[in-house]
Amino acid sequence: MRDNIIQLIYLVAAVGFGLSLRWMSSAATARRGILAGEIGFVLAIGATLALPGYTNEGYVYIAIALVIGTALGIPLGLRVPMTAMPQRIALSHAFGALAVGAVGIGKFFLYHEVYGKFELAVLGVEILLGGLVFTGSLMAAGKLHEVLPQRPLMFKGQNYANFAILGLCIAIVAYLMFRPQDTWLVLVLAALALAVGVLLIIPIGGADMPTVIALLNSYAGLSASALGLVLNNKLLIVAGALDGTAGLILAIIMCRAMNRSFRNVMFGAFGAVDETAAGGGDASGLGPVRTASPDEAAEIMKMGRSVVIVPGYGMAVAQAQHKVRELADALEAEGVDVKFAIHPVAGRMPGHMNVLLAEANVPYEKLLDMDEINSEFPQVDTVLVLGANDVVNPSARHEKSSPIYGMPILNVDQAQSIFVVKRSMRAGFAGVENELFYNPKTQMVFGDAKSVVGELANEVSGQRDAISL
């Protein structure tokens, strides 16, 4: 009877996980989705603790682990800024994969004489994926946080070496299926898996890290599903499958948005910029750079009928989203139609800009994705680009030697006038010059996004107040 109740609770929890993913796909239902996921996890943990076989000592260890996890999780959730969210997610993947891998190793040593060939194979795959995701996620977090070099680190025959080590890992898993008593090979498998995680990530540039994190998320889900098969835990199988599928879909979305393939990202050292092809930093043939002051930009925006704001990582770093909302409100008070153009990979993860602007209470219907807004740019009077770079670079359309060639971009250059807010002329993640900055219709407004946008908002609202007086 108790087992049936536990399985029923697991089913309800699995439904909660599914609804959570469904509802979090829309800003209007995202809070409901988070609540559904939280309820699902509470039910899952409670039902698991109700399983037979636990001792009082076991419950004590579980309670200690819950306290430690809670003490670490709350500060991570509250204090980590949105700009560091991708690396925080990578750390979560790393710790989850470490747990899965450790459980797999423990289960192998304890029960290798009892398990059949299928369970032993699944354990081997679980250990391989757990170790790979652990070190891979740590490397990705380090590159995103710039404590590790963002540039690709490569050596001759790197992919061959990676495939050779992966092949050796698979051979060890196959060997252990028939000779599980050679338990020392489990530790060799774990060490090789940790090495694979490092070797797979070092040749990938910092610009590709969000995509890599999504793929690692998928691998982590697969390892959790494998653990569920070994433990005969249906909920863990379902939750791992959901996690793996969601990570895979996210990676597909990001690769398409950046015109890249899994093979290119994981095994092509994509992100390594050919200095000759990328053009290095030579902008001599692109023409002069035009600049404008915030009051000049405010006057032109105020006089237009429509303004499109393109947020980028610079806005996120400056935490300028609230000032952006103030500017939009001031322009709308002048009768200007204001919209926001969101590129799928603006920032450092999909939805990054949406979350920041929603935090500032920007109406979600004003946030238009690339496919919705691109056809409107020729009719737009003014575009304000805030810290975005590669996602608005026109060279992606025609410069075949560019590392971003073929990447879908926002057609900002088709607007009547363009203002770009940046601290400097520094290139974006791809390391190439942005043709938009040298466009005759473009004027650069140099400075911190938060302070510049604040000045723009004050100029627009101040001018209106002066007229009313």
Image: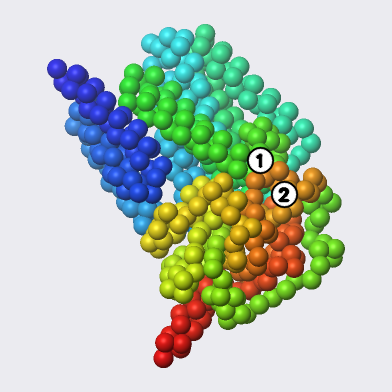
Q: Is residue 228 above or below residue 463?
A: above
Q: Are marks 2 and 1 in contact (CB under 8 Å)?
A: yes
Query: In x, y percent, where is residue 397?
Result: 73, 48
Percent of width and height locating residue 185: 54, 21
Q: Secondary structure at mark 2?
A: helix
Can the viewer see residue 109? no
**Disc 1 target residue:** 259
In the rendered structure, the answer to whether residue 142 lies left or right of residue 29 reads: right
Q: Which residue is mark 2?
A: 396
Which residue sits at x=79%, y=49%? 399
Q: How many marks?
A: 2
Q: Quadrant of the N terminus?
A: top left
Q: Does 188 sit left or right of 390 as displayed?
A: left
Q: Which of marks 1 and 2 precedes in the sequence?
A: 1
The residue lying at 59 percent from left, 19 percent from top is: 170
Q: Nearer the viewer, residue 233 or 444?
A: 444
